[in-house]
Amino acid sequence: MQVYLPDELYDAVKERELSPSELLQDAVRAELRHQALLEETDRYLAQLIDDVGEPSDDAVAKAEALSRRIRTSTSAAEVG
């Protein structure tokens, strides 16, 4: 397998004396785990919907509002 790195990434890897092979392996492992977790989340949500049904429009709106508040407060805390 051959992998192309743009010049700026190649230079940064060389400058830091990093192993491109190890970096690629770590990145691929992380992405595979990420994809597996997303698939498991989809399975869990499908099972949950089978068990309790689709959420109401009101429940979805409340969840979205809570999510926005959490993201806003998290962003503010990171800046502050």
Image: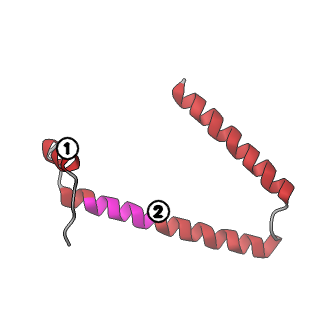
Helix, strand or loop under label 1: helix
Residue 34 is tagged as 2
Left/right placement of residue 20 relative to residue 39 reads left
Instruction: Say which quarter of the image contains residue 72.
Output: top right
Task: Return the x and y of residue 31 as percentages of the image width and height.
Answer: 40, 63
- Quadrant of the image containing the C terminus: top right
- Compared with 75, 39 (above or below) is below
Task: Return the x and y of residue 51 as percentages of the image width and height.
Answer: 79, 74
* Residue density around tag 1, few if under 14, some if 14–19, many if 20 or more, within 10 Å: few
Going by the numbered disc 2, the residue's amino acid type is: His
Please state which of residues 51 and 6 is positioned toward the viewer in this rendering.
6
Q: Nearer the viewer, mark 1 or mark 2?
A: 1
Query: Which residue is painted at 34% across and 64% down in the image?
Result: 28
Which contiguous range is marked in magenta?
24-33
Name the dominant secondary structure of the magenta segment: helix
Query: Which residue is painted at 64% across and 33% down in the image?
Result: 73
Helix, strand or loop under label 2: helix
Query: Which residue is painted at 80% across and 49% down in the image?
Result: 62
Query: Which residue is painted at 44% across and 65% down in the image?
Result: 33
- Compared with 74, 6 (above or below) is below
Task: Return the x and y of residue 76 as percentages of the image width and height.
Answer: 59, 29
Left/right placement of residue 48 relative to residue 18 reads right
Q: CA distance from mark 1 to mark 2?
A: 25 Å
Q: Earlier in the sequence, mark 1 or mark 2?
A: 1
Going by the numbered disc 1, the residue's amino acid type is: Ala
The answer to whether residue 1 is magenta is no
Left/right placement of residue 56 relative to residue 15 reads right
Q: Residue tagged by mark 1?
A: 12
